[in-house]
Image (tube, rainbow, N blue to C red):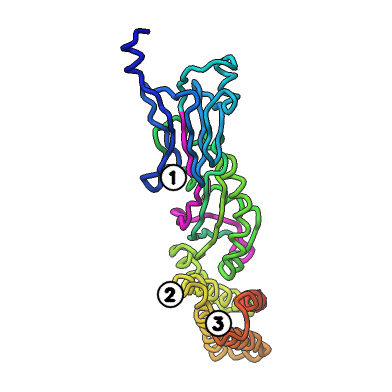
Amino acid sequence: MGLGSFIKKQFIDVLQWNEEVDGVLAWRYPMQDQEIQNGGVLVVRESQMAVFVNEGQIADVFGPGTHKLTTQTLPVLTNLKNWDKLFDSPFKSDVYYFSTRVQTGRKWGTQQPITIRDKDFDMVRVRAFGMYSYRVADPRLFFKEISGTREAYTRDEVEDQLRGILMATMASSLGSAQVPFLDMAANQALMAQQVKGDLAAAFGRYGIGLDEFNVASVSLPEELQAALDERISAGMKGGMSADKMAGFTKYQVASAIPMAAQNEGGMAGIGVGLGAGVQLGQVMGQALGATLAPQAAAAPAAPAEDSIEARLEKLKGLLDKGLISATDYDSTKAELLKKLIG
C-alpha cells in the first residue's frame, strides 16, 4: 500500500450512540470504508448494549461502560480472525447498538374478538384492551430473531410483530384457563394474571422482556349482545323459570360491567353499572310476577341481590371516605360479585 493510500484511509477511534431519534431499538454504526483502530474506545451508555458482528456471526457483546478495544477485550473476535496476540493493525467489523430502556405505555387491543369457551354462555367472543411495557433484554436473540442486519430497527416495527404474538398467546391462555367471562369482566387483574406469564415466555423467545401487562376493559361484541337479547326475549315469551331469571340477571350484570369500565374513572364506576344491571333484573322479575301470578306465588322471596347491592354501595362509600384501602375494597368487591352472579 502506498503512503498516499494509507493517509486517505480512515480510522475510527471512538464508537458511540447518542440516540438522537426516539423509538429506535437497534442501530448499526455507520462504518462505510472506515476501520476500527486497535486500541480505540467503545462507549456504551446506561440503557444500551453493543454487539460486534463479524461476517454475519455475533462475536462479542458489551454492556454499559467505556471499553478499550484490544485483542484482550475482543477475545471472540480475535479468535475468529485468527489474530496473533501481537497483532496491532486496525480491523473492520459491524457494530450494532441496542436500546435496553423500558418502552412504557404501549397500547394493545383485540382488533378481532377472541373466541373462548364459557361455562355461562357456552361460547363467547371477547374484546379486550389495555397497556403493556417491554424492553430489549437479550441483544443476541433480538438480533438473530428480529432486527437482523438492518441499519435501524424501530419500536413501531417490533410492535407490529409483538401484536400478533400477543393476540395468539392471549387466545391460548384464556382458552386453557377456562375463566368465565363474568369473572374476567368483574376483575381485569385476573385476566391479566392469566395472560402475563405465557406472554412473557413468548416475548422471551425473541430476546424481549415483558415488564408490565394490564387489562383496562373487557367487553362482548355488539352482535353477540344483540343475539343474547333475542335469546332472552324468546325465553320471556314462553315463560321464564327461576333459572332463566337468574341467567338474565347475570347477563345484565355482564353487560353493565364493560360499560362502567369504559366510563370516566374506569372500573371505579363499577358500582353504578352493577346496580343498573341488578335493578333491571329486579324490574323484569316484578313484571313477570304481576302477569304470572301462580309462578310468582310459588317462588320464594330472594332478597339476596338487594342485600349484596347494598353492601357494595356501602363498601364503595367506605372507600371514598378513606376508611378502607383500595386492596381491601377490590378483594371484598370480588367476593360479593361472585356471590351475586353465581
The boundaries of the magenta stretch are 95-122
**Residue 305: which disc?**
none
Name the residue: 60% across, 54% down.
Answer: 196
Judging depth in this view, the residue of 79 and 249 nearest the camera is 79
Asked if the residue at tag 1 contacts the one at tag 3, i.e. Cβ–Cβ closer than 8 Å, the answer is no
**Overall secondary structure of the magenta section:** strand
The N terminus is located in which quarter?
Answer: top left
Q: Residues within 10 Å of mark 2 (few under 14, many from 20)?
A: few
The number of callouts visible is 3
* Residue 239 visible at all: yes
- In this rendering, the answer to whether 2 lies above or below 123 is above
**Residue furthest out toward the top:** 2
Q: Name the kind of residue labelled 3 in the image.
A: Val
Image location (x, y in percent) of residue 134:
52, 50
Name the residue: 64% across, 91% down.
Answer: 297
Q: Earlier in the sequence, mark 1 or mark 2?
A: 1
Q: Which residue, given by chain and number where applicable, does mark 1 sit on?
A: 160
Q: Which residue, given by chain and number where applicable, does mark 2 sit on?
A: 264
Image location (x, y in percent) of residue 159:
45, 46
- In this rendering, the answer to whether 292 lies above or below 245 is below
Give the quadrant of residue 338. Answer: bottom right
> Would you say residue 101 sits in the magenta stretch?
yes
Q: Which residue, given by chain and number where applicable, does mark 3 sit on?
A: 278
Judging depth in this view, the residue of 52 and 337 nearest the camera is 52
Asked if the residue at tag 2 contacts the one at tag 1, i.e. Cβ–Cβ closer than 8 Å, the answer is no
How many angstroms separate mark 1 from mark 2 (CA)? 29 Å
Of circles 3 and 1, the one toward us is: 1
How many angstroms separate mark 3 from mark 1 (CA)? 41 Å
Q: Name the kind of residue labelled 1 in the image.
A: Asp
Q: Earlier in the sequence, mark 3 or mark 1?
A: 1
Image location (x, y in percent) of residue 26:
45, 39
Name the residue: 45% across, 21% down.
Answer: 92
